[in-house]
Every structure is written in C-alpha cells, then in structure tokens.
Amino acid sequence: MARKSNDGIGRRRMLKGAAGIAGAAVGSGAITGFPVIWAQNNKNIVLRQCGTGVSAINEIAEKCKADLGITLQMTALDSDAVVQRVVTQPNSFDIGDIEYWMIKKVFGANTLQAMDVKKIKLFDKIVPIFTTGKLKADSVIAQGTAPSTVSFVEGAGSTKFAKGQTQWFTIVPTIYNADTLGIRPDLVGRKIDSWKDILDPKFKGKTSILNIPSIGIMDAAMICEAAGIVKYGDKGNMTKAEIDKTIDFLIKTKKDGQFRAFWKTFDESVNLMTSGEVVIQSMWSPAVSAVRGKGVPCTYQPLKEGYRAWGGGLALAKHLQGAQLDAAYDYINWYLSGWVGAFLNRQGYYSAVLETAKANMTADEWGFWMEGKPAQGDIKNPQGQIVEKAGAVRDGGSFYDRMGAVACWNAVMDEDRYMVQKWNQFIAA
C-alpha cells in the first residue's frame, strides 16, 4: 500500500482524538513483558522518520515523547518519494517507515542497516506472516512480494535476501491489512461477491481503482483473473505478455467509460464514495470507516477470490550508531509494546504483536475488530463517532478470516520498470 502526503494528513485528521480512547486501557498494567511507565533515557534524542502517510500520525509522536523522551520528526511522502529519499538521501532520515514492496527497491542500495533480532524484545511474538510467511502451519504463502521473502538478509552487512530466517531483519513490521472493494450497499442494488463485479455495465461510470502502480496492478490482476480475461502464472510477478494483456484490457475498459476516476489519496476515495459518484471501488479500511462516520452506508466487501494485502514497518538508516541507534531500538520495542498496536487496530488495521495490542483494548473492541464477534456496545471511531451499532459484525469477520484469505500482496515484479511504464500509458490513455 502506498500513501500520498495529503493522505497522511487526512488520516491524521481522522485519527485526531484517538489517543484518549487508546489511553483508556493502558492503566490495566497488562502490557506483556513491559512496564507501564517507560524510563526516559532519550531526552535529547531526535529521530527523523520519513515514510508514507499511513502511520505518520501526530499522536504516535506525542506518545513516544511522553513515554520515551524521544522527539520524532515525521515526514509523510508519497511512495515514490520515500523510495527516492531512502536510496539517494540516506543522511536525511534516521528511521525509514517503508512498505514491504519497497524493500526490493531500496535495500540493495546499502543505505539501511539490518536489525539484530536479539535486540527486538518481542521478536518471537511477531505475527508469523512476517517471519515464516505462514499465518498458520498449513497456510499457503500468497503471491506478490510476501513480507517473509524480504524480511531477512544473510548477514549483518548483507543486502542479499535470505531464503529463511536469520538473525538479521530488514524492517520491523508495524501495520498491515487485507484490502478489497468498498461498496455503497444502498446504491449497488445487488449482491457483490467477486472482484469482477466492478466490471458490471450497471455500474458504468461509477467505479474506481487506485492509481499507484504496484498496488493498482494487483487490483487489476484480481479483476482480470476473476473475469477470466487473463490467466496468470503468478500475478505477483507477471510476464511482459501478461502485463500487456492486463493493461490493454484496462485501457479498453477506461475508454468504454466504466471508470469514474483513479484515486491516489485517502480523501479522494472517501469523497468519491460519500458523494455517490462512485458506488464500487478499491478502498482502504479506514476510508470505509470515514464514510460511515459521515452517516453514509459503506461496506468493505469480502470477495470469493480473496484479499490483496499490504504491510509496512520501520527500518534503520545505515548511519545510525551509538546513543541514536540505541534510541531507535527503544522506539521500535515501544512501538510493539501495545499502545500503538491498539491505536491502529481501532482504525481497522492490524498490529504486528497481537497480545500486547489486546492488553490495551477493551474486550468488546478486541472482539469486534479482531475476533469477528458481534459488538456488545456501539463501536466508535477515534473521533468518538459511532461507526457500528451494537450487534454489528466487522466486514470480513475475524483477523484469521481476513488475513487467512489473502490472495496476493502488493508487488515489485521482475518487470517492474516495464509494468510502471505500461501503467502510466493506461492512466494517460
């Protein structure tokens, strides 16, 4: 998943006030393995964090300062700018907040340092999607740039990805989700259960997909495969011929008037859905919540072909050493300790260490967001607006229902440059 900078602003605005909700459960003292009060040994440390807007959240920086004494300076950029900065301006940041599909683009530049898993206190508690690649023992690793394939390198100074687990971790996962289509149930007028439903002539001029190549191409592949347009060997690593077929179909569909727009930012997707200009489109989970928060019905629709997943995490700049490097590890360990995880879970995201997030949520919150249980009371967004009434069940069900139904991850393909060129031709057509 990639995010534009104004997307980050929109999310931070939507998240305003969540700190109070998240803080309510902290006093339980049940944060596994960590004290409730953190020692502030980093009062003069400043860490410059650059990344996409999804987790460049003011409340996280404020809480980090309060708990650790670390000053976080967050810069939210679009995905291409993140990649460019990490590769070409390595001294301009200390923490890279990057997505898994980006790792293939940036780690080979040798501007990041691998992390010693022995210094990550909750490493063994991290959801295994990011370590073994399998949510459960019998899970099949999805197509695309699955996190486990780029999570480890062969040694402390290596930039070569390891085939299995090693002591050296590329990024510590922080936030992830399984995406699908959002719909206006009051306007579509029929059951939606497949990615190909976005092609229904009934919705001509009222559909949208997102315009970020490494993500949009995966949505397009899910649509084309469901509709029988293209049969992929591996949609996460398409051949040039498969890319051509996919883009040619998208261009034809665009010229036929099926699409209303191609959005890049959170706010764009919310506005399209809220206004009714679009009734079915690619969406991010918090955008669905934002539409509901405006009193407009919106559903994050489970589809029989499965979900497209994304994830991101924190990486360390190569130049970090001494007290700054120690502070960076403190920050990462704090990030996994529960407060941030609960904060993000309440937005419909998922956190990397589930049990510490659970300790910072009410039983009803955890039941609704993570276990697929009917809400016992009204479910509110971080602004205090009711997004679900008592009795509601989360779209897609439980964490394991959703993440267990991932069909692909956002991807950087072997033919990435060719794919991006073709995608840009589609947008310009």
Image (tube, grey):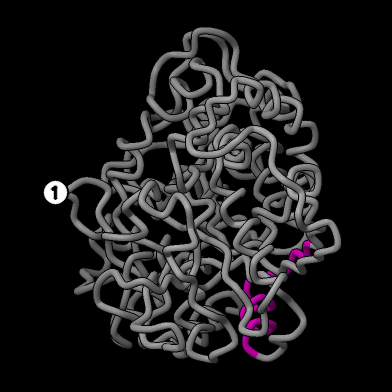
Per the image, is 350 magenta?
no
> Which amino acid type is shown beneath numbered disc 1?
Asp
Left or right of 68, for residue 176:
left
Question: Which residue is painted at 53% across and 77% down in the image?
Answer: 426
Which image quarter: residue 39? top right
Whether 244 is drawn above or below 149: the answer is below
Question: Which residue is painted at 76% across and 46% down in the image?
Answer: 12
Whether 239 is drawn above or below 201: the answer is below
Which contiguous range is marked in magenta?
74-87
Left or right of 349, for residue 287:
right
Whether 338 is drawn above or below 170: the answer is above
Helix or strand or loop: what does disc 1 sit on?
loop
Nearer the observer, 55 or 385: 55
Dominant secondary structure of the magenta stretch?
A: helix
Nearer the observer, 147 or 248: 147
Question: Which residue is painted at 57% across and 12% down in the image?
Answer: 389
Per the image, is 80 magenta?
yes
- Residue bearing mark 1: 138
Residue 53 x/y as whole percent: 70, 58
Residue 112 x/y as whole percent: 57, 81
Is residue 244 at all visible to an observer of this figure? no
Is residue 423 at all visible to an observer of this figure? yes
